[in-house]
Amino acid sequence: MNVETITMDPDEARERLKAYRTSLHRSADVEYEAAAAGYQALAEGTPIIQYERAIRDAPRDDKSRPMLAIARADRTQVRLRWERREALFDTSLRDAPNVPTGSLLRRSVDMGEPPDYRTEWGSQHTAGHALVPMVPPHALKAAGGRSRLSEHLILWEVEEWSDTPIGAVPDRDPYLLRPIHGDLCAVVAEWDLTPLERAVMADRASR
């Protein structure tokens, strides 16, 4: 997956982290805390991405759907909806309709303009479905175990959006992300789904 990342020499990141931590000892500041968290990741050699920019810059299909998706890592399927010019990636339960878009269950991305299919894909209309990639053991370990997956996101390349949940097919090339601040996330793992893993995932769409 070709996504721009933020990287830095770990030694330089450690120096900058030290300066931010020193400042935070004197007074609390949300942006300084976010910068310190980012430098902590960079000091550990972990790249950082801005997933909103990645999704906004991604190619789109003939229905204006971005070919990248974001979802909470412990979910199995994501639903793409349009809210005017925002793409809303929704993995909330049907019986929890009032989950705010700021939660990890729902992530919205300002696409800059409404979709080209304004009539067919209007506000709140379901525009597509995709399967959330399964997390293999090495990525699960990087997340801190299965109980910590709900604190992470997965960004992946969608090969083809499905118009219905049953038609969704497995995709490839996911990134496991740890949120830092806003859409800024540390890339804690990346992998390619094997043919076997994709075959296992495909069974979800038939349930």
Image (spheres, grey):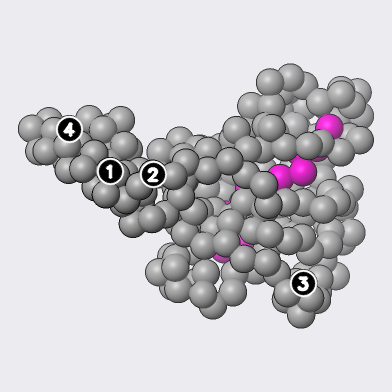
User: How many marks do you count on the picture?
Assistant: 4
The residue that mark 2 highlights is 8
Are the residues at dot 3 and dot 1 in contact (C-beta closer than 8 Å)? no
The residue that mark 4 highlights is 28
Q: Residues within 10 Å of mark 4 (few under 14, many from 20)?
A: few
Is 39 or 132 nearer to us in this picture? 39
Q: Between marks 4 and 1, how big is the CA–CA gap?
A: 23 Å
User: Residue 12 has which mark?
Assistant: 1
Q: Between marks 3 and 1, how big is the CA–CA gap?
A: 40 Å
Residue at disc 1, secondary structure: helix
Closer to the chain start, of discs 2 and 4, is 2
Q: Residues within 10 Å of mark 3 (few under 14, many from 20)?
A: some
Instruction: Tell whether position 51 is magenta.
Output: no
In the rendered image, residue 149, in percent from the top left (x then y), is placed at 49, 64
Residue at disc 2, secondary structure: loop
In the rendered image, residue 165, in percent from the top left (x then y), is placed at 83, 57
Q: Between marks 3 and 4, how big is the CA–CA gap?
A: 45 Å
Query: Which residues are the magenta region?
Result: 64-75
Q: Between marks 1 and 2, how big is the CA–CA gap?
A: 7 Å
Left/right of residue 3 with respect to residue 183 in the rendered view:
right
The residue that appears at 62% across and 44% down in the rendered structure is: 3
Residue at disc 3, secondary structure: helix
Closer to the chain start, of discs 3 and 4, is 4
Closer to the chain start, of discs 2 and 3, is 2
The residue that mark 3 highlights is 198
Q: Quadrant of residue 98?
A: top right
The residue that appears at 89% across and 26% down in the rendered structure is: 117
